[in-house]
Amino acid sequence: MTNHPAYQPDPILARAGVGLKADHYKTILNTKPDIGWFEVHPENYMGDGGSPHAYLSAIREDYPLSMHGVGMSLGGVDPLDDDHLSRFASLVERYQPALVSEHLAWATHRGDFLNDLLPLPLTQEALDVMAKHVDQMQSVLKRQVLVENPSTYLSFEAEVMEEPEFLISLVDQTGCGLLLDVNNVFVSACNHGFDPVAYIDAIPAELIGEVHVAGHAVEEINGAQLHIDDHGSAVVDDVWSLFGRLIDRVGPKPTLVEWDTNVPAWGVLKAEADKADVLLRQNDMVLGRRHDDVIPA
Amino acid sequence: MSSLRDFQNAFGSTVRGAPTVPAGVCAAYPIPLERRIDVYRNNVHSSLIDSLEQAFPVVLQLVGQEFFRATAREYLRDHMPTCGTLVGFGDGMPEFLDAFPPVSSLPYLSDVARLELLWLRSYHAADDIVLAPDEIANVPQECLPDVKFILHPSLKALQSAYPVSSIWQAHQPGHRPLATHIGEGGEAVLLLRSNLSVVVHKVGAGTVSFVDALRSGEPFGVAAAAALNAENDFDLSQILHLLLSGGGFTRLIRS
Ligand SMILES: [Fe+2]
């Protein structure tokens, strides 16, 4: 295991952020909205130059960033792609994001990239693969990575761990942090029939570096419901109440509102982030801390 | 249990379309496994096909969405992305279309795809300095033929046997699709980024020869001769003005 500084909560970031969308670049630069931070998929900024980098640089002048990878395939049995890792590292070097994250998932198949977060059987072998790759990613990036729980649709006979236990073991082995996606917990809980509250309660506060909330779709199949994580709508009440419960326990955490398909107008997205901010601030007051006036690092 | 590698090999084939359910997969809730696996199959294909729709918006309009998505699905059989970013995904589309029988009645389609790929490459090209027009003014007239120009990374050029520029322009937002007669002959385009936007200029064949020659390291005099060879009425001063005012050169090298 490599040594990384323990995760230090960054007070400015214990607010809501949203995903940065090209459609919103100009509005953000022109209106400088009061929002904590922006999250980007580094994969979208792996071109050499031009518009994406120009806008991201300009926005980075005014806001902290989170880099949320979707293409590393940390759970893939094949070695990590060194080129992808070094592209990721140059983006981290260039934009100095406050947070860096990736997923408990895999995405590569016989040298091809499948562009989805595929499910990992929670076995000892999978834990070893994840630990090795998280370690490598943290070494190359020279910083802590947060690992996100995926939404899943399938289980595996060979699984020997529940997801919270698996993630906590991964933290023990690598010193990584966790990105707790409350919507993913809810979606998986509905799809597998486990209790989302018990899952949320099982994650120790100090391991959580970031939280996600998002909307999802529901498909009726033979009178039953399959919940599908499409980030295509507003956050549902069940997810907001799970989020409220989490924040009551762990205090304010940087919280992303994910809305990646059917991306709404800026105002709608911002209003959703404001909802999260209200919940975060309520708990901030309870804990007797205020962070509104801290200047971005 | 089979090893993780066996599982990922099997599950990867399944989500790519194999009609199989890998060993050891289960589900606790009464929704059939197949429907659950379909979520992954759909995520993989629809996300990649969406990305191809975004990369080739004019090809999409030319063939219609249903046909485009079916074509893209065929494309994916042998052209999955090979790295974790989709920047550059779709590079093989023009050659794929050239060899795809269902579009053989649209011979211009692959060149439209080439133009759209060049647009993307120009859009993502590295940032660089721009040659100040003064610098060329300072070169003595007699030395000009030996000067070499370094092109801006966003400068691209394409010669087609079809009216690709007219077709492309007619399918831009806000333009009314025009009836383009593909028998009207070939067109050439020059792409260059201006204030972060890629501008597509309709040019003559000489311009493409000129730019190609400069790109391969030929001096100005040789490039100009190649241009005149390709196009009788090649207007050197007009094209120089376009390239200098549009930031098409980064440096010049005097021998
Ligand atoms: Fe998430």
Image: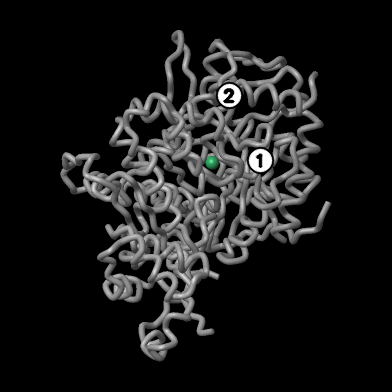
The x and y percentages for residue B243 are 35, 71
How far across and how far down the image is residue B147, in percent?
47, 80
The circle on residue B15 is 2
Q: Quadrant of residue A147?
A: top right
Asked whether residue A96 appears in the rendered view, the answer is: yes
As drawn, is A11 to the left or to the right of B55?
Answer: right
Above or below for A243 versus A218? below
Which numbered disc covers residue B227? none
Disc 1 element: loop
Instruction: Say few, some or many: other residues with alpha carbon within 10 Å of mark 2 (under 14 / 14 to 19 / 20 or more).
Output: many
Asked if residue A28 can be seen in this view, the reply is no
Secondary structure found at label 2: helix
**Which amino acid lies under the numbered mark 1 shown in the image of this protein?**
Ser
Rendered location of residue A246, percent (x, y): 56, 41
A70 or B100: which is nearer to us?
B100
Q: Residue at x 51, y 56 (%)?
A: A47
Give whichever of B222, B163 is nearer the camera.
B222
Query: Chain for mark 2?
Result: B
Name the residue that disc number 1 marks. A73
> Dot 1: few (<14), some (14–19), or many (≥20) neighbours within 10 Å?
many
**Host chain of mark 1:** A
Where in the image, quadrant-wise, is ligand 1 located? top right
- Residue A221 x/y as whole percent: 45, 12
Using the rendered view, name the quadrant where residue A107 is placed.
Answer: top right
